[in-house]
Image (spheres, rainbow, N blue to C red):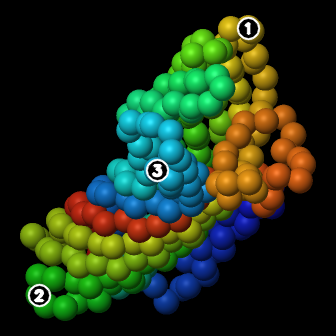
Amino acid sequence: MKKMKVLFSSLLTVAVLLFFAQPGIAKSNLSFGLKLGGGLNYMLLTDYNNYVDDWNTYLENEPDTFTGSFDNLHMGMNFGGEFILYFTPNIGIGIGAGFLSASVDQPQVEYSFSGWLSTWYKVNQEAKVSAIPVRLTFHYTTPVSNFMNFFFNAGVGYYLGSLEWTDDGSAWLFGAYSTSAEASMTTIGFHGGLGLEFKFSPAISFFIEVQGQYAKFSEVTGDYTNTNIFGTTAEERTLYHYVWAPDNTTELVWATAPPSGTNYTDVREAAIDLTGAYFGGGFVFRFGGK
């Protein structure tokens, strides 16, 4: 992670040095922009959604009875602001930050298993993923008409993320339980997009854009608490991914060590994958320049 921080700071330093190293850029050509916007964000969150899909398939194929189903976690909101220094009317470098999040409050799922000792379970899960990306972005803008511009952007970001996870339920044999976990994460990500800018005046524009992003948290460790009839456990745990071989189902578990045994395959630390697409709009305010 230290190398990631060095990479991000190095890119920022290079951008600043490139600007001041260009004597041909006259001060009158410089302008400043403030970009504010937001919209819908779609994230893959592959490990979590595979876990949800496999559980739903398992319940549907079981002869025992169940009600409800687990929901996927994909859609969320994305908001941000950016300060842009335009070297020319077409080229600029921006530094900004944003906030993106997605959450799901699972409806209560009830299921029962028949046999020599019939049992029943009630489960309610809630998951919330959020991140604050600090981004360095290259901007290129070209006029389409007197009142409309086409733009392209691409850059790198340092993502500060968090995961909140709760799992509450009750069982006929073991009574009620409550599980919660909170983890903080960091990673380097990349983004790029394109869009249209509609000019109300030389100083104010409205924009719409589509942007893709790649950002994956691969080390998810945090404070874990579980309370049941046997007492309370509070410790630091890591979120692990594995496939339970007998049923070929994806599982996620908070544990102090990777699960092991012949029935556990594809064992690894779980990833929180924010890779996806964003669609939104907002306003750009420009100051200075010709």
The part of the image, by quadrant, that contains residue 16 is bottom right
Tell me the amino acid under the disc marked 1.
Gly
Numbered disc in front, either 2 or 1: 1
> Which residue sits at x=22%, y=89%?
143
User: Answer yes or no: do the residues labelled 2 and 3 have beta carbons within 8 Å?
Assistant: no
User: If the image is split into quadrants, where does the N terminus sit?
Assistant: bottom right
Question: Could you say whether the residue bearing mark 1 is in a helix, strand or loop?
Answer: strand
- Looking at the picture, how far across and down is residue 216, in whole percent? 63, 60
Q: CA distance from mark 2 to mark 3?
A: 58 Å
The part of the image, by quadrant, that contains residue 226 is top right
N-terminal label among 1 and 3: 3
User: Answer yes or no: do the residues labelled 2 and 1 have beta carbons within 8 Å?
Assistant: no
> Which residue sits at x=29%, y=78%?
195
Q: Which residue is mark 2?
A: 146
Question: Could you say whether the residue bearing mark 3 is in a helix, strand or loop?
Answer: helix
Question: Could you say whether the residue bearing mark 2 is in a helix, strand or loop?
Answer: loop
> Which residue sits at x=46%, y=60%?
43
Q: Is residue 114 visible?
A: yes
Tell me the amino acid under the disc marked 2.
Asn
Q: Which residue is mark 1?
A: 231
Q: CA distance from mark 2 to mark 1?
A: 70 Å
Q: Is residue 287 visible?
A: no
Q: Which residue is mark 3?
A: 60
